[in-house]
Image (tube, grey):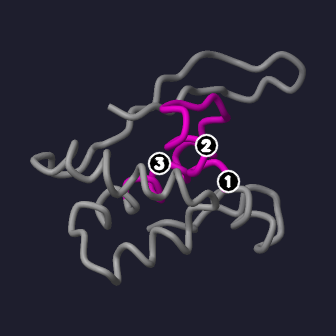
């Protein structure tokens, strides 16, 4: 279930960070972050793609309310919804890249399939 990890932040800043990371993922196609953040972003990104596949007005409004940039939200609805229409989940991939220098956090690349 999305939202079970606290990620060491208060609720409002955690939600803002996840919204920004999901927006950035859809804007660029991939992001590099820690593994725990990538798992949390993956669940929300896959929920947004699932909403865009249905395509009714309520789902579109939910996408526009979560994604922070309007052009990226339109891209999710117009591009990623039809692209993944025949796929039943699994729209993202997590590739572990090793440890981060400095604090040895496990890093990963999260990308759209």
Q: Which mark is residue 74?
A: none
Tell me the magenta residue range: 20-46
Label 3: few (<14), some or many (≥20) within 10 Å? many
- 106, above or below 63, in the image: above
Residue drawn at x 63%, y 16% as measured from the top left: 98
Counting residues from the N terminus, which is met first, the one under dot 3 or under dot 1?
1
User: How far is the residue under mark 2 from the one under mark 1?
Assistant: 6 Å
SS assignment for the magenta stretch, majority: helix
Q: Position of residue 31 (x, y in %)?
A: 59, 32
Residue drawn at x 53%, y 22% as measured from the top left: 96
Is residue 81 found left or right of 8 in the rendered image? left
The answer to the question of whether label 2 and label 1 lie on touching residues, with beta carbons closer than 8 A, is yes
Residue drawn at x 77%, y 20% as measured from the top left: 100
Front position among marks 3 and 2: 2
- The quadrant in which the C terminus is found is top left
Label 2: few (<14), some or many (≥20) within 10 Å? some
- As drawn, the residue found furthest toward the bottom would be 58
Residue drawn at x 81%, y 57% as measured from the top left: 8
The answer to the question of whether label 3 and label 2 lie on touching residues, with beta carbons closer than 8 A, is no
Front position among marks 3 and 1: 1
- 92, above or below 5, in the image: above
Q: Residue tagged by mark 1?
A: 20
Q: Say what secondary structure mark 1 lies in.
A: helix
User: How far is the residue under mark 3 from the one under mark 1?
Assistant: 13 Å
Is residue 20 found left or right of 88 in the rendered image? right
Q: Which mark is residue 42?
A: 3
User: How far is the residue under mark 3 from the one under mark 2?
Assistant: 12 Å
Q: Say what secondary structure mark 3 lies in.
A: helix
Q: Residue tagged by mark 2?
A: 24
Label 1: few (<14), some or many (≥20) within 10 Å? some
């Amino acid at each position: 279930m999305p939202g079970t990890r606290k990620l060491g932040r208060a609720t409002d800043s955690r939600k803002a960070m996840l919204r920004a990371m999901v927006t950035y993922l859809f804007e660029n196609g991939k992001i590099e972050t820690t593994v725990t953040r990538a798992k949390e972003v993956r669940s929300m990104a896959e929920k947004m793609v699932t909403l865009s596949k249905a395509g009714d007005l309520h789902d579109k409004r939910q996408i526009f309310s979560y994604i922070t940039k309007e052009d990226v939200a339109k891209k999710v609805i117009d591009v990623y919804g039809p692209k993944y229409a025949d796929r039943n989940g699994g729209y993202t991939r997590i590739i572990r890249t090793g440890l981060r220098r400095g604090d040895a956090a496990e890093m990963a690349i999260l990308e759209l399939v």
